[in-house]
Amino acid sequence: MLTLIARDVRIGWASGGIVNALAFFLLVTILFPFAVGPDTALLARIGGGVIWAAALLAALMPVERLVAPDMDSGVLDQLAVRGLSMPSVAAAKIVAHWLGFGPPLMLAAVIAAGLLGLDARTLGAVELGLLIGTPGLAALAVATSALVTGLRGAGSVAGLVMLPLAVPLLIFGAGSLDLGADDGMGAIKLLGAVSLLLLAGAPFVAGAAMRAGME
């Protein structure tokens, strides 16, 4: 498992997919103030939601490359021959995908917070939400990638599949920005519940999809 995780992290960085996702995340947060204007109060009020929306789109960018290359090259067949179950392979891919984009995204959020004028308290809430929610995004991305592998226009289909399912993460993540209020703490708990649900179910969904693609 550790070898698979290290391999996928290395491939993600070498292919440039992770770098492109981070660049897209920062580009969104840089351009958004130009679109809204110099109203710092408005930017501070909606900046956390902008960061979450950008994080969701950044997680979606490398979806096509998470499973399809291994399926096409026969790597999954070799892993199956060696006795590894597809849910285990999917779990390794989820961990690798999160390690590739989760921590770097949290670091990039510090830069985004400065651009959007977020105070330290709001930034802390954003970072906590990203720490809890990005594993769910990674699990959803891998499951989506396995489901659309082999389909024509897989990138467009992946967006149609993943974005609606990620809406709860986006809503609860944006709603968790005020940790001092009861609503903020409730949103954090719901965000954690949704993320755990995705982490628990995604390996089995992705594993079943990969097995079907190998037949």
Image (tube, helix red, strand yellow):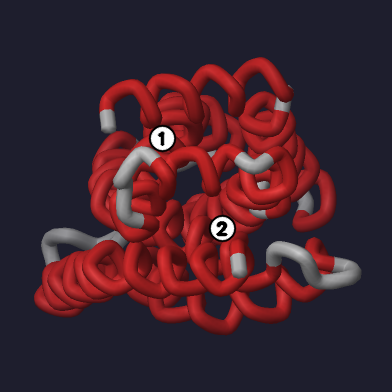
Per the rendering, the mark at residue 199 is: none
Q: What's under tag 2, amino acid-wise? A: Leu
Circle 2: element type: helix
Q: Position of residue 50 (x, y in %)?
A: 58, 57
Q: Position of residue 182 (x, y in %)?
A: 10, 76
Q: Which mark is residue 96?
A: 1
Determine the residue positioned at 28% across, 45% down: 131
* Amino acid at the residue labelled 1: Ala
Residue at screen point 55% across, 50% down: 55
- Name the foreground residue: 69 vs 142: 69
Residue 122 makes an appearance in the image? yes
78 above or below 151?
A: above
The N terminus, quarter of image: top left
Residue at the extreme right: 152
97 vs 32, nearest the viewer: 97
Residue most extreme to the front: 81
Q: Which mark is residue 56?
A: 2
Question: Around disc 2, counting alpha carbons within 10 Å, would you say few (fewer than 14), some (14 to 19), or many (20 or more)?
Answer: many
On the rendered structure, is 11 left or right of 155?
left
